[in-house]
Amino acid sequence: MPEWPEPQRPDFVQPVRRPPALVKADALAFLIFERPDLDKSERFLLDFGLQVIRRDADALYLRASASEACCYVVRRGQQARFIGVGFELRESSGLDVLVKQAGARRISKLDIPGGGQAVLLTDPLGHEVWVLAGRQHSSCMIEQEPRLPTNTPTATPRVNATVRPSFGPAKVARLGHVVFQTTDFAGLTEWYMRHFGLLPTDVLYLPDGSPNLIFFRFDRGSEPADHHSVVIAGGLTNSYEHSAYEVQDLDALGQSSQFLRSRNWKHAWGIGRHSLGSQLFDYWFDPYGAEHEHYADGDVFTADYAPRYSPMNAAGVWMWGDDVPPHMLPKPNLITVWRAIRLLCSGKLSLARLKQMGAALSAPARPWMK
Ligand SMILES: [Fe+2]
């Protein structure tokens, strides 16, 4: 798959134009989900590798191993749905900027483990967007398995020592990224770039050269940031696609995959290695069918790394591993047709763009495989 750095971008490919940023977000803080049954969610999330910090009648707060602050909130509610996302800023002055210039609402008493100051926005999809500063990240890293050196054909640093990773839930280190699909790709990507200074790392374009999926990273200047922390894809729905959580390495990924299987959770995709971002990955469904990804060994980039442009297709999603499963691609069924018709009738999608999206995703990912 060709990857064009910005300076070599082909003429027909439209560049992503970044609006001036109101603030620069530094990290994801947490995700918020609504679920009818907290017990069911808790069972999955503990097996997935998160830990409960607090539970009350109507909410569940979980953490990962790298910080005592909450990275996952489950609210009890009627529906199973994604509610929103939290971002962290380095400086609390950014909160004032969002109040004055974006109409953010100040939260006077923040009752989410990790504390700090917070303001609340709503994104164009209607998600709650919490913005926090001054959270407490006590250095309470939960012990990971000791990592042994890897033997290779040219070097065998591991002598008289065996590899025996333990069987059990992964020790998830942190929340890594969240992926959204939207029917308003231009509007949603502009909103997130403008509010949080997100930087495009990889941009996938349709056959006509128009961007339709962006992997965004945080602007941390000379400090490296993950290849992506927010991904926005154009499509026929407005939806949460998946969220991802970092584990130590391939052994942690593999052993936790066996453990989740032993607990009868439903596997979604993996193990494999992504191309854009390079992560080793393994996807699981939570009890409500929402995809949760374990990953390890992802790329990181400083702010001066230029965006890269690639054609959008299924083949670009992974380097090796099982083929991308059909549930991750638009389904060729009546619901999809109905969604497309509604978007066409409402003027939110043009027929030309719909054809471009279809062409991009219908190309066989592995033409050499039958
Ligand atoms: Fe992912």
Image (cartoon, grey):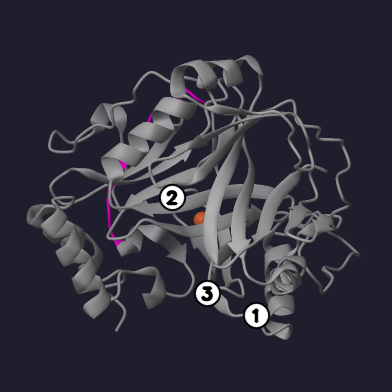
Q: Indicate the quadrant containing the C terminus: top left, top right, bottom left or bottom right.
A: bottom left
Does 39 appear above or below 129? below
- Which percent across, then down, holds residue 196? 49, 28
- Residue drawn at x 23%, y 34% is 9
Residue receiving disc 1: 265
| Residue 181 appears left or right of 91 | left
Residue receiving disc 3: 268
Residue type at tag 1: Trp
Q: How many marks?
A: 3
Q: Is mark 2 within 8 Å of ligand 1?
A: no
| Residue 76 appears left or right of 220 | right
Query: Tag 1, which secondary structure?
Result: loop
Circles 2 and 1 in contact, beta carbons < 8 Å: no
Query: Tag 3, which secondary structure?
Result: strand
- Which percent across, then down, holds residue 130? 59, 37
**Gap in angstroms between the C-alphas marked 3 and 2:** 19 Å
Report crowding for label 1: few under 14, some 14 to 19, many 20 or more residues within 10 A (C-alpha): some
Residue 325 image-quadrant placement: bottom left
Q: Is residue 127 visible?
A: yes
Circles 3 and 2 in contact, beta carbons < 8 Å: no
Residue type at tag 3: Ala
Of the numbered discs 2 and 1, the one sitting upstream in the chain is 1
Does 267 appear above or below 365? below
| Residue 337 appears left or right of 73 | left
Residues in magenta? 303-313
Residue receiving disc 2: 276
**Gap in angstroms between the C-alphas marked 2 and 1:** 27 Å
Predominant SS of the magenta segment:
loop
Residue type at tag 2: Leu
Does 119 appear above or below 341? above
